Image (cartoon, helix red, strand yellow):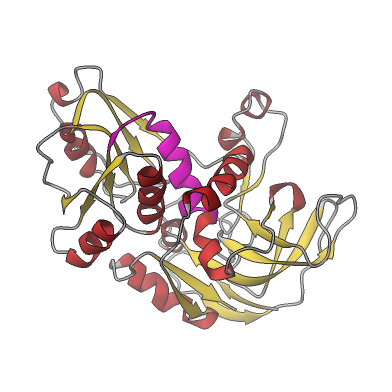
Amino acid sequence: MRAMVLQGSGSPLRSEERAEPQPGDGEIRVKVSACGVCRTDLHVVDSELPDIKYPIVPGHEIVGRVDLVGTNVRTHRVGDRVGIPWLGYTCGVCRFCREGMENLCDRPLFTGYTRDGGFATDAIADARYAFPLGEEGDDASIAPLLCAGLIGWRSLVMAGPAERLGIYGFGAAGHIVAQIARWQGRSVHAFTRRDDTEAQDFARRLGAVWTGASDQTPETPLDAAIIYAPAGELVPAALRAVRKGGRVICAGIHMSDIPSFPYDILWGERQLVSVANLTRQDGLDFLKVVPQAGIHTQTTSFPLEEANDVLSRLRSGQILGAAVLRP
């Protein structure tokens, strides 16, 4: 098999030839056909997350077909198309797992972070954490749904019944969530970098009723705002944009430090909350919604060997929608 491997902090990914991995008990091996490139992959490559397992193969928006099944697997067969998301394993016995909050598991494994991911021709997954995808849809278009879509869905649910929704950072997750929100009858307000007219035009094409720079505010306060950009300075800006009783959701796994802000922009029972990972139920619920809402992902595909260049382009905001690697 071929894989793009992160050897250590600060190093670029390196192409390696490896022996084909063998699935263990309860595991499947998947031939990767597409793997989305997520901002979390950047956080791994840039050493912004703790306890990274080196060497590691990044990538956690994996679409492929099962080509080998380990022992005690009853849910998947050879040839099945599956999706492998960020959450790769949970212990099942800690308080959070027992109480239905497996996204907060004390001993989890995460695809492309603490277990090898999909920037490769082959990937191993715990069969319990691989979603059946059926045969509808293109592999590259589906790949971003497995993290950008899933985290977007969980953050949208946390926004509650907000009719006026703000989206800060109109990238892979933002453009998926905007489509669901419009399908649900919400009005979408898209916030981008000040000079990113391409992203603002993109948001308007997807039905946004207002677009502007992240330091601007619509005339009417928002009911809720979701922050996908990993920029802590957006938190005070979003708090200023929401009404009393409104909610600001920080949807990234990593964010730069949040600057101090006056209490009066939080007062009035505004809420500031975070989204952590996802649950398998999130995935099942979201994948049912995708065809109903008619979601279409904007993707650009690249060869696996161009992973370093794609990450650089994502870092500098040069990707419209989502990037996908094709082995």
Name the image quarter holding residue 24.
bottom right
- Residue in the foreground of this view, choosing between 301 and 72: 301
Q: Residue at x 33, y 67 (%)?
A: 320
Name the image quarter holding residue 104.
top right
- Residue in the foreground of this view, choosing between 113 and 291: 291
152 shown above or below 326: above
Q: Horizontal placement of 127 versus 324: left or right? A: right
Residue 100 visible to an observer of this rendering: yes
Residue 226 pos. (x, y %): 32, 41
Magenta-drawn segment = 146-164
Q: Residue at x 19, y 64 (%)?
A: 196
Q: Is residue 236 magenta?
A: no
Q: Residue at x 59, y 46 (%)?
A: 288
Residue 199 pos. (x, y %): 25, 62
Tell me the quarter of the image containing the C terminus.
bottom right
Q: Residue at x 28, y 60 (%)?
A: 205
Name the image quarter holding residue 249.
top left
